[in-house]
Image: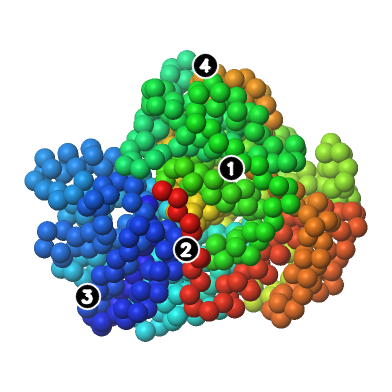
Amino acid sequence: MCGITGLFDIRERRAPERERLHRMNESQHHRGPDEGELYVEPGLGLGHRRLSVIDIATGQQPIFNDDKSVALVFNGEIYNYQELMAELGALGHQFRTKSDSETIVRAWEQWGEDCVHHLRGMFAFALHDRRRQTLFMARDRLGVKPMHYALLDDGWLLFGSELKSLLAHGGMPRELEPQALEEYFSLGYVADPRTIFKAARKLEPGHRVLWKRGEPVPVPKPYWDVRFTLDNPISQRDAEAELHERLKEAVRLRLKADVPLGAFLSGGVDSSAVVALMAGLQGSEPVNTCSMGFDDPKFNEVEFAQMVADRYRTNHRVQTVASDDFDLIDTLARLYDEPYADSSAIPTYRVSQLARRHVTVALSGDGGDESFGGYRRYRLHMMEERMRAAMPQGLRRPLFGTLGRLYPKMDWAPRFVRAKTTFEGLARSSVQAYFHSMSIMRGPMRQALFSPKLKRELAGYDALAVFERHAANAGTEDPLALIQYLDTKTYLVGDINTKVDRASMAHSLEVREPLMDHPLVEWLATLPSHYKLRDGEGKYLFKKTMEPLLPNDVLYRPKMGFAVPLARWFRGPLRQRVRDAVLGERLADTGWFEPAYLRQLVDRHQSGQSDFSAPLWTLMMFEGFLRQVVDAPESTGLPVPEVVA
């Protein structure tokens, strides 16, 4: 696991500025504290920060082919590298190292751009081929590892694992993208391929792009997508058996490491399943596990994590986080480089910090909810779908649209009488309704929040377009499969993977994701939807498969999530801080927000009339981003973390 960065001259072969490249590389020191290397030749500069995990002695980067005409910088892990070495060796390739990175170089020599089809893992890489005068960039299928890039007006292409490496160059304009603001205040993140900066882009998951010197600017192309065919005729008994074998294989591949390895254990189904499978594969060697506890029982899952730890006799470590652990707010703003509003970034940062004291690699349960159908919102959406199917849209829209407008928003009331969101959802199409349910600030709230100036700059753009673009490519009309696909393309990438990558790499911790093993994801997409959601039970097949390995109290309890008590913070210890941030000069200076509405949000929340904790956190993190990133000097790298051997 590493941080990569670089410069590529798309016009000529000018000499890159080594000092700029050094700044870019060192801004990502936290991603690779073990070693740092630069490589420069006419028209090219490559930087690499290494976290040594596999082939510690000879796995340095950039890594080259035999005559050094091909140079690679790579972030991630190729889990099938040993199988690839054997395959490529049989084709005549000779390996100088035992590293997974060399397999990418040899795969490029053998298959060119199609090398990505042979890679099983999490990765983002840039490969320069001097003979072809090209720079090839690719990102893994599920977007576990990030890749950012920017083409400057002078013809220099910048790229890096994190946006901070592009900012550290000093030549990239910091003008913000209005459409990214609309996406952020809708979803809590800026959706791929956009970034918060007009000048920069993200390479989307499952995409590749080939830059050729002297030729027009290329358009990234997809090389993979998941297809929800739902046509697998397998019986439930056979499906359980096959799922168990596929899960074991996904975990087994991720146990290869030359450094200490462990797992996150939250007490939820996904992480518990990963730990159970690890325990079976490691035999007598106990699994290293870690959990975060909370002093607020509404957010604490420690007892369930302990059940699993006891059952498998893991080396289990627990750290309790105070419910007033909000000291990370400014750190998070710097960490993510663009506004990011998932407050569970706080406990994710803390559990990564705990894990890194004992291991260098940790397996996680991320990705399970999307592929297995685990989110509570899936059940609610399917209930709405049945109601939508029973009534033509021409009748639904005026009836439920009117009810949605008239029904009061009662955040304080019991859930069963809070029908406003349901009415609003029933008035919409399936994609519109799902976007509405996923929005932190829904359409009317954004309209009230945004100033006339920002509305003019948006020119009618609505973040719903993100969902509609992906829905057009989903290839399924099954309502559950459609929203699983949407989550795989949006929430999983923009929220979950972003959160885990930045929080873990801030502590130089590599996190691996067996439930995002792409052959597993592809196979699950062939299964009918009733294997995912049945009789109101999400992850139906997954839970049935894991019944012999996990307690029912873990498998069938209500889902808790990894939350923090924002509503209480903003009425208590953060009362003044949220007022200062939301009503202060920095947001006002942008001219993008209505001051009266900002004050209304703060006042109504702090008086207890409404729960605006999520919108207020979103605004607070945006204000922190402006101060910590936009207004910061060129070098925006984090302090070098303490790394415990």
In this rendering, is residue 538 above or below 225? Answer: above
Question: Could one spot residue 94 in this view of the protein?
Answer: yes
Left or right for 290, reference 395: left
- Indicate which disc residue 627 carries: none
The amino acid pointed to by label 1 is Ile
SS at mark 2 in the image: loop
Q: Earlier in the sequence, mark 3 or mark 1?
A: 3
Left or right for 117, reference 246: left
Q: Earlier in the sequence, mark 2 or mark 4?
A: 4
For the point 63% across and 52% down, the residue is 346
The amino acid pointed to by label 2 is Val
Q: Which residue is mark 4?
A: 548
Q: Which residue is mark 3?
A: 41
For label 1, count other residues whose C-alpha is less than 10 Å away and answer few (under 14), some (14-19) or many (20+): many
In this rendering, is residue 554 above or below 397? Answer: above
Left or right for 138, reference 432: left
Q: Nearer the viewer, residue 329 or 229?
A: 329
Q: Nearer the viewer, residue 225 or 630?
A: 630
For label 4, count other residues whose C-alpha is less than 10 Å away and answer few (under 14), some (14-19) or many (20+): few
Cα distance between the residues tagged 3 and 2: 29 Å
For the point 40% across and 72% down, the residue is 24
Is the Cβ of the residue at disc 1 closer than 8 Å to that at disc 4? no
- Indicate which disc residue 483 carries: 1
Question: Could one spot residue 433 in this view of the protein?
Answer: no
Cα distance between the residues tagged 3 and 1: 47 Å
SS at mark 1 in the image: helix
Q: Which residue is mark 2?
A: 640
